[in-house]
Image (cartoon, grey):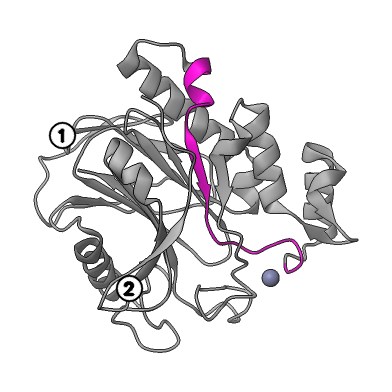
Amino acid sequence: MGLDLPRLSVHEDSSGVRFLTDEALTNACGVTIGFTERGGGLSGAPYASLNLGRFAGEGEQAAVKNMRHLMKVAGAEGMMLINPDQVHGTDLFEIRASASVAQNFSSASSDLEAGTEDTLLTPEADAVLVNAPDIFALLGFADCVPLIFVAPTGAFVVAHSGWRGTYGHIAPKALTALARVAAQAEGSAPESVVSQCNVYIGPYIHKECFQVGSDVYQLFADEFGSEVLWGEDHVDLGAAIRKDLLDAGADEARVVDVGLCTVCHADRFYSYRAEGGVCGRHGAFAFRK
Ligand SMILES: [Zn+2]
């Protein structure tokens, strides 16, 4: 059975935690996704308040407390938490069996201990592929592009695409890997699954606010063409990602963008640029029950 076309709406609970989610998706395949906002957390200024960045400067403990709070609010209390150390690369970390075995595509595979309530897994990666229930995948952002991919089988990827990851094509890499895993489960061809996956693009620094040096501008001009450039020295990360995804076979109707710039909406999201480099991180998350 196919997924409904992606559609985002704001979920807010009484604690003040807000995230953009797709309710029809949860009903269709059991996967809950979210792009979090700043409110409802435990942190004070300048990290106020739902800071989800373990390395944002506030300390790991504070961020992990906020993560557990978010999990509770989102209905994922007690699940294994996977929150990678993001390195602006394009490596994808994969978890298949529920809290038992993980395999890293790019380096040695690693065995995990059976999941416990407080398990926190922190592989070095900028994308996490999960094909198991009861695992909460969370990545943090402050201007970079958050991406969530969901297959009809309930497998999903959460990815971090800054300019380096975008330039390195992490988006199509994640989509292709997801389609391969989903196709395996269905016994179908990966090429046919790519166009059935939903793709969610979260809040990020939009082209009007993303001024770059001439070196980065030129890299994007050479790699993606003039359609991802804006003015003399701005780059459109969203356009580059969208172009990449369509080239990889994604269905345009299944790619949805929340349409919010982090710099212009620093009241709702964290922005490294708008806040002078001292700020928390909002999150992109997904889990399946
Ligand atoms: Zn802006």
Foreground: disc 1 or disc 2: 2
> Which percent across, then down, holds residue 230?
84, 57
Under tag 2, what secondary structure?
A: loop
Q: CA distance from mark 1 to mark 2?
A: 31 Å
Q: Mark 1 highlights which residue?
A: 100
Against 229, residue 29 (above or below) is: above
Q: Is residue 240 left or right of residue 199?
A: right
Task: Name the foreground residue: 8 vs 221.
Answer: 8
Left or right of 224 on screen, residue 25: left
Quadrant where the C terminus sits is top left
Is the distance from the Cβ of mark 1 to the nearest ligand 1 atom less than 8 Å?
no
- Neighbour tally class for label 1: few under 14, some 14-19, many 20 plus, Cα within 10 Å: few
- Label 1 SS: loop
Which segment did they paint magenta?
191-209
**Disc 2: which residue:** 17
Q: Is residue 242 above or below residue 87?
A: above
Q: Is mark 2 within 8 Å of ligand 1?
A: no
**Of callouts 1 and 2, the N-terminal one:** 2
Residue type at mark 1 is Ser
**Residue found 50% across the figure and 76% down from its top:** 268
Question: Is 224 on the left or on the right of 176, as rendered?
Answer: right
Q: For residue 196: magenta?
A: yes
